Amino acid sequence: MTAVGMAMDVLFADPNIASDGLYIPSGEDAVPVRLIARRPDEIIGFGETRVISETTLFDVRVSEVPEPRPGDRVTFNERSYVVQGEPERKDPDRLVWTLDVRPA
């Protein structure tokens, strides 16, 4: 395992940063995972107007969820979410999926 991989494991193990959740692939059983929740506001331009929209993103390790797909579900803090859009791996070592979700 690389140093970056070990650092990611430490990050996802930290209870101040990551939390337990469930990943539920379509038509399959739930898988326990560690999630990092992010809720940034997204600013969308519409002509002369700017609209601020709340978003929810979850980071999950590729080692826990190798192939997430749109339509899969995530349960976090007793709330259920649906993965919308294609998951992305933005980190240089491609160790973490970023999931854009909406409430189920």
Image (cartoon, rainbow, N blue to C red):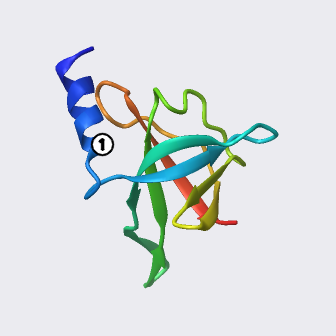
User: How far across and how far down the image is residue 77, in percent?
Assistant: 51, 66
Crowd rating for badge 1 (residues with CA inside 10 Å; few <14, some 14–19, many 20+): some
Side of 97 relative to 1 (left or right): right
Q: Residue at x 46, y 57 (%)?
A: 57
Instruction: Choose top left, top right, bottom left or bottom right for residue 52.
Output: bottom left
Residue under label 1, please give it: 13
Side of 30 relative to 41 (left or right): right
- The quarter in which the N terminus is drawn is top left
User: How far across and how far down the image is residue 78, in percent?
Assistant: 58, 67
User: How far across and how far down the image is residue 82, in percent?
Assistant: 66, 57
**Front residue (pair 87, 62):** 62
**Front residue (pair 30, 74):** 30
Looking at the image, is 43 positioned above or below residue 28?
below
User: How far across and how far down the image is residue 74, in percent?
Assistant: 60, 53
Looking at the image, is 43 positioned above or below residue 74?
below
Q: Secondary structure at mark 1?
A: helix
Instruction: Choose top left, top right, bottom left or bottom right for residue 37.
Output: bottom left
Side of 17 relative to 23 (left or right): left
Q: Residue at x 46, y 72 (%)?
A: 44
